[in-house]
Image (tube, coloured by chain):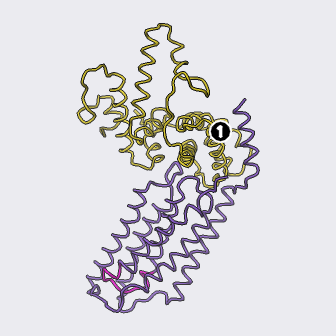
């Protein structure tokens, strides 16, 4: 089975990479294509990283301005999304927004409430309550994770980066990303499955066969 | 609707910001890097150029060959970026500096010992080599910083440090041809310390010269 690192870029990424390569060569019309392809994902990343909604537009705009100013340094064949994420992440840090957005349930003022959207699809009141409790537990557990585990989980599990791309993005080794994803995932699983019974700690827990295959035995 | 507004705002904004294309940047970098290398070589030539000073030609050739390999590997790690276009992490940059430096000192001292030329040399503490290294490396660093000025959107400090260490390794290659002393304290003061000084200088000014100003 091919590893994630060997998997060819997703179609959206290919379009973005091609547009960025053309833009770096001076094709001004390629910027609009690039923007349309990656802006929603950059906005999603920034939205998850900042507590202040008024800054989201600012950070997204500055990310694109920096992509524009640094277009000449873009390496042909590189993954523009990974590059753009790193720029956006650094801008989030510059803006002092490194903390994860606090989950505020139904009283969020900006944008649609993801919890409301999730539970709307569940008809049964008991299941609604369970879904809400699980999600709350998950969000709280996620926020208690070390920052490196949060970032690794986000890049690999949410954004679909390969371990190698995530490692390069975070400036750490691939083994370190694998470890962070495994430990973070195990902590979230424990938080969700916790039913009051004692569970093994992260150091005692043995990886499953699937995890061994996925993480190449580095756990 | 909001995202369309933002897109229009971004398009209007970038139309006001000058940004070189890849070809323009490559041309600028080629000229500046060539000028930097020429400047360093000129300083090296003015200071006396290649000086055997009692060293057999085979020793000069072997030490220079080894130093060129170590410095070349280190400079490749320090000046290039990964597949995603992101500068390598601090751990790799530090390893890419320390490994060639340690290899250089061991190689130089080891070969000097083989030729019985690594004994203490009290009149040569290493200050002249230090000044020469900082001079030639400083020219290379300045050229690299100017060639990449204001185009690093992510890690200008790390890039500056990498450029400084890379310039220091490059100058170590020249100084190796110039200096006959293989005594370890001399090597540390005259040949290794300048690399640390240039790396620190690169990191210190990288944010201003390589980084992008917030608009």
Looking at the colours in the rendered structure, which chain would you say is drawn in purple? B
Local secondary structure at mark 1:
helix
Side of A218 relative to B26 (left or right) = left
The colour with which the image depicts chain A is yellow
List the residue tagged with mark 1: A57
The structure residue drawn at horizontal position 37% and vertical position 29%, both measured from the top left corner, is: A188
Q: Is residue B182 magenta?
A: yes
A181 to A130, vertically: above or below:
below
B124 to A163, vertically: above or below:
below
Decide which of B125, A2 is in the foreground and name it: B125
Expressed as whole percent of the image width and height from the top left, the position of residue B108 reads 33, 78
Side of A33 relative to A73 (left or right) = right
Magenta stretch prevailing secondary structure: helix
Q: Which residues are magenta?
A: B175-187
The structure residue drawn at horizontal position 39% and vertical position 42%, both measured from the top left corner, is: A177
Decide which of A107, A62 is in the foreground and name it: A107
The structure residue drawn at horizontal position 37% and vertical position 66%, both measured from the top left corner, is: B98
The structure residue drawn at horizontal position 40% and vertical position 65%, both measured from the top left corner, is: B97
Specify the subunit that label 1 lies on. A
Which quarter of the figure has residue B196?
bottom left
């Amino acid at each position: 089975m091919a590893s994630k690192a060997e998997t060819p870029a997703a179609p959206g990424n290919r379009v973005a990479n091609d547009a960025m390569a053309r833009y770096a060569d001076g094709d001004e019309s390629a910027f609009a294509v690039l923007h349309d392809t990656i802006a929603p994902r950059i906005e999603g990343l920034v939205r998850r990283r900042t507590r202040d909604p008024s800054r989201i537009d600012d950070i997204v705009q500055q990310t694109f301005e920096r992509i524009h100013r640094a277009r000449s340094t873009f390496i042909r064949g590189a993954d523009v999304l990974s590059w753009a994420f790193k720029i956006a992440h650094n801008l989030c840090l510059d803006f002092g927004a490194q903390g994860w957005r606090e989950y505020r349930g139904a009283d969020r003022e900006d944008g649609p409430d993801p919890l409301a959207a999730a539970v709307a699809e569940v008809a049964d009141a008991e299941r609604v309550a369970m879904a809400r409790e699980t999600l709350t537990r998950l969000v709280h557990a996620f926020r208690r994770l070390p920052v490196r585990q949060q970032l690794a989980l986000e890049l690999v599990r949410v954004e679909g980066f390969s371990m190698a791309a995530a490692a390069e993005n975070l400036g750490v080794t691939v083994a370190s990303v694998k470890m962070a994803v495994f430990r973070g995932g195990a902590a979230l699983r424990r938080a969700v499955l916790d039913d009051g019974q004692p569970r093994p700690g992260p150091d005692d827990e043995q990886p499953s066969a699937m995890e061994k295959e996925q993480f190449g035995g580095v756990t | 609707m909001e995202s369309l507004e933002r897109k229009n705002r971004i398009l209007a904004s970038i139309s006001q910001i000058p940004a070189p294309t890849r070809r323009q940047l490559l041309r600028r970098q080629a000229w500046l890097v060539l000028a930097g290398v020429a400047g360093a070589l000129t300083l090296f030539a003015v200071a006396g150029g290649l000086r055997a000073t009692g060293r057999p030609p085979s020793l000069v050739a072997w030490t220079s060959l080894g130093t060129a390999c170590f410095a070349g590997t280190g400079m490749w790690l320090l000046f290039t970026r990964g597949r995603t276009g992101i500068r390598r992490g601090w751990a790799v940059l530090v390893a890419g500096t320390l490994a060639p430096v340690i290899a250089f000192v061991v190689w130089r001292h080891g070969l000097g010992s083989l030729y019985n030329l690594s004994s203490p040399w009290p009149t040569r503490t290493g200050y002249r080599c230090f000044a020469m290294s900082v001079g030639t490396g400083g020219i290379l660093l300045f050229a690299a910083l100017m060639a990449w000025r204001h185009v690093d959107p992510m890690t200008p400090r790390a890039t500056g440090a990498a450029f400084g260490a890379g310039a220091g390794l490059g100058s170590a290659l020249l100084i190796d041809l110039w200096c006959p002393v293989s005594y370890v304290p001399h090597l540390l003061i005259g040949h290794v310390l300048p690399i640390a000084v240039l790396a620190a200088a690169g990191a210190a000014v990288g944010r201003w010269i390589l980084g992008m100003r917030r608009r």
